Amino acid sequence: MEQMHLVELNKKFGCWVCAVATISGVFSCTDNSLSASKIQPNPTENELVLSEIPLVPPTEVAKTRPADIELAPAVLHQNLSVANKLLSSGQFLDAEIVLRSILKEQPNCARAEFLLGVTLLKQKQYAKARPLLEESLARKQDFSGRKQVDHFLGWTCFYLGDLESAKRHFQSHVGAMPTADDSYYGLAVIAIEEDRMSDAQVALERAMELIGTAPDRNKDRAKVLARLGDVDLRREKTSEALELYEEAATLWPDHYEIWGKLARVYDTLNRPTDAQQSRAKQQEAMKRTGRGPIGESAP
């Protein structure tokens, strides 16, 4: 795929690009392939000079670009499609059982390692997921979904606190798939964590452009808007952040963390009634979605 540099991004988008709460609807049962998903987490203005730094270092792209790697044929198994369907329908424990059975029979099946890694990632077993995902790449097999491994490794490393590796995997993914809005979002989350607000903003703007305006992407737009709100809040632009949070909550009322952010902004603005109402809506959203305690959701 065509390599992207920040110089090009600055010209095209005006500024540069820098975790699953939900990785849903990403497993295709018709073509047995995997698409990248979405998952989320802040700066003094010690920003990078964006025009001088490539988004994906040429050496990294050269290492990961599929066209530049000689791949062996995939190791197949008749139950891979069964595991994929279980995974796509959210039956993670059942998928794990099937995939472990496959790997007992075919221990060098890279696609089974990949799918098992994603299954464990979905179950928040990040330390167990990472070596499986890494091994699936190391086998250099031409299996379905191989281009997406870096995306899932990005979030796995992020949740393990390894931001440098997470950044490298997200960069590799967008180097191979420049339209991967999920990985731009991941780069933005890391930029916020590393106090690089300009990088975060451009990454989020790029993700928003790629997401588009289709109604079925409202959740994704809401997540990006909420993160743009975080950027404005870090820059002490409270009014702008409030507008972004309110728009995000309108697009995705079930995203309870947005209601929590709104409540905190209302507290800052001395609007106790609005803050109380936002916290009530937060609790309602958590109840509707069966979410755990506040703070446990993905980016």
Image: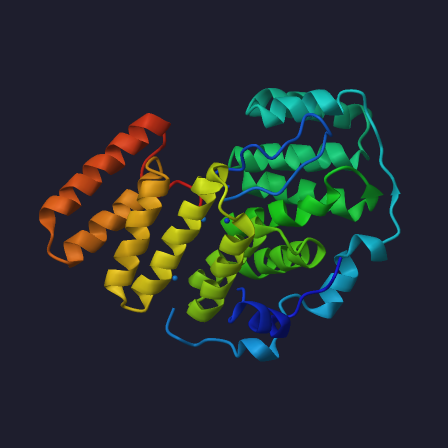
Give residue 34's position: percent from left, percent from top: 67, 36
Comparing 249 with 125, the one in front is 249
Give residue 224's position: percent from left, percent from top: 43, 52
Instruction: Tell me if residue 21 comes above or below residue 54 in the rendering.
Output: above
The answer to whether residue 249 is visible is yes
Give residue 63's position: percent from left, percent from top: 78, 60
Comparing 164 with 217, the one in front is 217
Give residue 257's position: percent from left, percent from top: 32, 43
Residue at 68% in and 25% down: 29
Question: Is 215 positioned to the left or the right of 108 in the image?
Answer: left
Instruction: Tell me if residue 5 comes above or below residue 227 in the rendering.
Output: below
The answer to whether residue 162 is visible is no
Q: How many marks?
A: 0
Residue at 77% in and 56% down: 65
Residue at 66% in and 65% down: 56
Question: Is 40 positioned to the left or the right of 179 in the image?
Answer: left
Q: Quadrant of the N terminus?
A: bottom right
Instruction: Tell me if residue 90 comes above or below residue 224 in the rendering.
Output: above
Indicate how the structure is coloured in the image: rainbow
Residue at 15% in and 53% down: 267
Quarter of image, res 192? bottom left
